[in-house]
Amino acid sequence: MQLLLPSPVQTVTFKNRTFYLKRDDLIHPDFSGNKARKFYYFLTRDFLQIKRIVSYGSVQSNAMYSLSVLAKMRGWHFDYYISHLPPLLRDDPHGNFKRAIENGMRLHIDKPPEAYDDKTLFITEGGAQSEAEEGIRLLAEEIVAWQKAQRLERLGVFLPSGTGTTALYLQKSFCLLGSSNRVYTVACVKESSYLKEQFALLEADEAVYPQVLEPLKRYRFGKPYRELFALWQKLKIQTGVEFDLLYDPIGWQTLLTHIDKIDTPILYLHQGGIHGNESMIRRYEKIRN
Ligand SMILES: *Cc1c(COP(=O)(O)O)cnc(C)c1O
């Protein structure tokens, strides 16, 4: 698989501000964004015994789709566990779900088993595990090399979080590389306190935790909100870039709310997820009618 690494960085203007935009969405048409970073380890290492991947989570998740691509690339089976299958999706498969099934994903409506043999690679929901650090370290190295060429001493790097794995390992990697870059994030799936608990599961040293910014208001993850759709559309028109509909509108809104507290140039990390937009757009079409 040919990956576009280092991923490109461009400049965009939005709301009269200039941002650097790191295009991890362009890494590969089918394997991109932070899932490409998080699963990089599983793509590039030898796993001589492994015959299948087992994972679980939501039925439209970007992680699920990326794992289906990974399994296909490596000739492994992929068993994915969900708690239930919405009838609308069963009758009319679309989005990440459809693509994952096409890649050979075997779906189980059940709890994931508790024990596995040594031929199985078990991946936690959203890839929130220590193996993610390797690919995210590479991301940090790319950013540091790029900013050196641009003579940018210090950056604020912003990215919206689900499990917080990407934000945490990115800040940790900057620290290990001796960079003074600061990582800012926002909790999109649950409360900020959940995000901090997640950081603690992966890393004991609080000195390397990202800074968590508060969202303007509490949004229910995955629920359509007109104002978020409007922001997503405006971003697309003004920057020419399609962002993800689940995380990025909350990300940009939060960043713009707190922007005056950040006194360095800002780099926004595009974490991919565009294939997931199809199912979100369907939900938005429903609330418009
Ligand atoms: C998975 C995902 C996230 C969240 O990543 P975490 O490492 O779990 O915080 C954010 N944006 C997009 C587009 C994603 O696919």
Image (cartoon, rainbow, N blue to C red):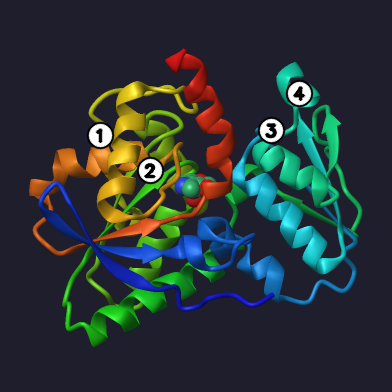
- Ranked by sequence position, the earlier of labels 3 and 1 is 3
Q: Quadrant of residue 225?
A: top left
The x, y position of residue 29, in whole percent, is: 60, 62
Q: Residue at x 18, y 71 (%)?
A: 154
**Where does label 2 land, which residue?**
248
Side of 91 relative to 5 (left or right): right
Identity, as a three-letter code, of the amino acid under mark 1: Glu
Which kind of residue does numbered mark 4 sit on?
Leu
CA distance separating discs 3 and 4: 7 Å
Circle 3/circle 4 CB separation < 8 Å: yes
Mark 1 = which residue? 214
| Mark 3 / mark 2, whichever is N-terminal | 3
Of label 4 and label 1, which has the lower sequence position? Answer: 4
Q: Would the CB of label 2 be found within 8 Å of ligand 1?
A: yes
**Crowding at label 3, few (<14), some or many (≥20) Cα neighbours within 10 Å?**
many
Q: Do residues under tags 3 and 1 come within 8 Å of each other at their CB atoms?
A: no
Q: Which residue is mark 3?
A: 59
- Please, what is the three-letter code of the amino acid marked with disc 3? Val
The percent coordinates of residue 127 (x first, y second) are: 61, 51
Q: CA distance from mark 3 to mark 1?
A: 28 Å
Q: Quadrant of residue 178?
A: bottom left
Identify the residue at image location x=10%, y=51%: 16
Q: Residue 218, image x and y in percent?
A: 33, 22
**Distance in Å between CA atoms under marks 3 and 2:** 20 Å
The residue under the point 53% across, 40% down is 277
Q: Between residues 149 and 212, which one lies in front from this camera angle?
A: 149
Foreground disc of the pair 4, 1: 4
